[in-house]
Amino acid sequence: MEFRKSALLFVALVFLGASNLLAQEQAEAPKYGWENTILGNLNFSQSSFSNWAQGGENNWAWQLDLNGKFENKQEKYDWTTNAKVSYGRTKVGDQQSKKSADEIRMESVLTWKAGKTVHPYIAFTGETQLTKGYDFSTDPKTVISQFLDPGYFTESIGLGFEPFKDCKTRFGAALKQTVANDFASRYSDDPATTDIEKVRSEVGIESVSDFSRKVSENILFTTKLELFSDLSTFEEVDVRWDNVFSAKVSKYIGVSFNFKLLYDRDISLSRQIKQVLGVGLSYTFL
């Protein structure tokens, strides 16, 4: 009888331990499938003056940003697509309104989980603008860009890894195309030839690093550094560095600061810098 009791107790303990272990494994099992997020931000500012002793000009500005992330996580691979649409305008005094932001950008990366730290990948990136861009230094103003004129596209293949928490880096061979039509002489032409090329293709290497971390409960810092070189000279490394501080003041009110640095000798011999401080409405659609 004592033996039976001991055996039943042993079986019960084994069953209980196995049940707890199975529950832990199920709780820790990774979730596969799609995870989609679309975030919209609308910032607006306006100032009006009437008989103001200190002077000033009436002005207004607005900017709309839509950011989407679509991620398909599977056991053997991850497929992540990031998309961004940004557009804004500003007006000062009697001057005509001018756009202050205009960007369409998409990045899609397919990663195979071949190991614990290093993962092969293929990636595609495309970038252009929504509406016409003007040079206001001429009279009348001159159109210098428009939708897909220029357009920038990059295809790459290589290895990705995570050097530390919240940081992802990939490095590999890349093909880069700059396409243009009406403004080919400004963006895609090779001055060494007599013809005007509407497509400029470059073969080289790329490095892309993403870092994102919560500074506090309501403040998020993200940075993305993209480098491309056709290996001709060290000075001709294309640089795109995008930094964003975003803070959630309330459920629908957000504050953001964006600092962006661009360097591409094919477009300008000097680095390009843009910074935007925005306060406005923020809404998550998905």
Image (tube, rainbow, N blue to C red):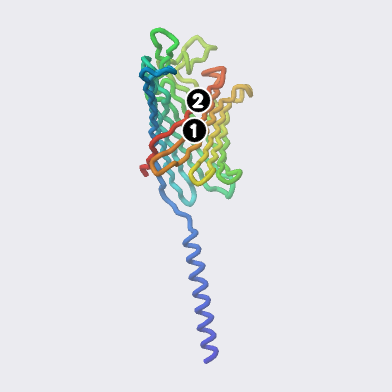
> Outermost residue, bottom direction?
1
- Label 1: few (<14), some or many (≥20) within 10 Å? some
Would you place residue 196 above or below residue 36 in this image? above
Mark 2 or mark 1: name the one nearer the start of the chain: 1
Mark 1, secondary structure of its residue: strand
The foreground one among 90 and 114 is: 90
- Label 2: few (<14), some or many (≥20) within 10 Å? few
> Outermost residue, top direction?
139
Say which mark, if any, is on residue 16: none
Disc number lying in front (2 or 1): 1
Corner quadrant of residue 69: top left
Picture coordinates of residue 185 (x, y %)? 46, 13
Q: Give the residue at mark 1.
A: 257
Which residue lies at the image location 38% right of the left edge and 21% below the top edge? 59
- Separation of disc 2 and disc 1 at Cα? 11 Å
Q: What residue type is labelled 2?
A: Lys
Residue 50 lies left or right of residue 79; in this view the side is: left
Picture coordinates of residue 279 (x, y %)? 43, 34
Q: Are discs 2 and 1 less than 8 Å apart at CB?
A: no
Q: Give the residue at mark 2.
A: 274
Would you place residue 2 above or below residue 166 in this image? below
Q: What residue type is labelled 1?
A: Phe
The foreground one among 118 and 92 is: 92
Picture coordinates of residue 215 (x, y %)? 54, 43
The foreground one among 112 and 227 is: 227
Please state the total of marks drawn on the protein image.
Answer: 2
Mark 2, secondary structure of its residue: strand
Viewport quadrant of the C terminus: top left
Picture coordinates of residue 39 (x, y %)? 40, 39
Which residue lies at the image location 57% right of the left edge and 49% below the top edge? 115
Which residue lies at the image location 47% right of the left edge and 40% below the top edge? 247
The foreground one among 142 and 205 is: 142
